Image (tube, rainbow, N blue to C red):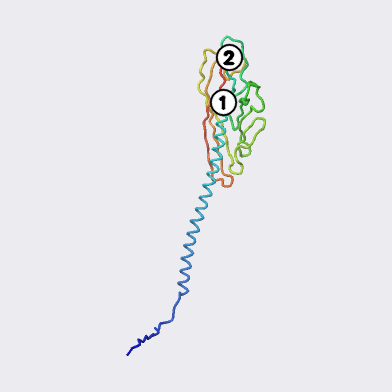
Amino acid sequence: MLVTPRFVIRARRTGPVQGLSIVELLVGIAVGMFVLAGATMVVSNQISDNKRLLLETQVQQDMRAAMDIIVRDIRRSGYTKFADSLVQPVNAPAKAAVAYRPAGYNNFSATLGSSITYSYSSEPDNAAKNTIEADDMHGFRLTSGKIEALLGAGGYQALTDPNVVTITSFDITQQVSAPMPLPTCETTPCATAACPLPNGQYVATRHLVLTMNGQAVHDASVRRQIRATVRVRNDEVCL
């Protein structure tokens, strides 16, 4: 005889299901708001730091790029491809003086101000080897919160970006070494050619110290200073 098993399912009786009380709900919401406020503050500070870092980088790069261009160009001041043909030998007929003037030429004061002009040869051939033309004039100046570069006949053009950085000051000072005599100098031709030192009997090396201060256009608290020293290489001497 087969016995069929019987399964008896009995329902368990439980009490009524209870949720959160108003006090517990308010406490939970308050804790969640504190956590959310902390996270928002962290994100906000990170965004502000990133924005400031971006401004600092833009200002630094713009000012550094401008200073590099200024230094490289000043080193070329007074350059002429045919300088050897203008050298004055001893006891020889006077030759023409070099027309191109290096930065700070004939100005031995300590302060040159916030602008500088000079000339150097831009001719690729022998067409005008000792004649200053419009394209041979170069220089830099501070005007309306930006550094401008003199590009020959093209006139002055902005070198720094006025939408990124405001240049608050641009100072050029000169350091002149003690003059050294040149015993073989031919006095008379140099005197008539207006050499940079009295009677053309001396030569002095010069360094220009450039200081540029700027601040971000959109945040005046972001400020930077760039300094550079450049050796003026093409001093005019009498030999």
Quadrant location of the C terminus? top right
Residue 88 — which label?
2
Residue at 59% across, 18% down: 195
Q: Residues within 10 Å of mark 1 (few under 14, many from 20)?
A: few
| Residue 196 percent coordinates (x, y) | 58, 20
Amino acid type, mark 1: Ser
Judge the density around disc 2: few (<14), some (14-19), many (≥20) Cα neighbours within 10 Å.
many
Q: Quadrant of residue 123?
A: top right
Give the structural element (helix, strand or loop) at label 1. Answer: loop
Residue 192: x %, y % from top left: 62, 15
Q: Nearer the viewer, residue 95 or 191?
A: 95
Q: Residue furthest bottom?
A: 1
Residue 6 x, y percent position in the rendering = 36, 87
| Res 73 → quadrant | top right
Residue position marked by numbered label 1 in the rendering: 109
Residue found farthest to the front: 1
Q: Is residue 34 left or right of residue 125?
A: left
Q: Could you tell which of marks 2 and 1 lies nearer the N-terminus?
A: 2
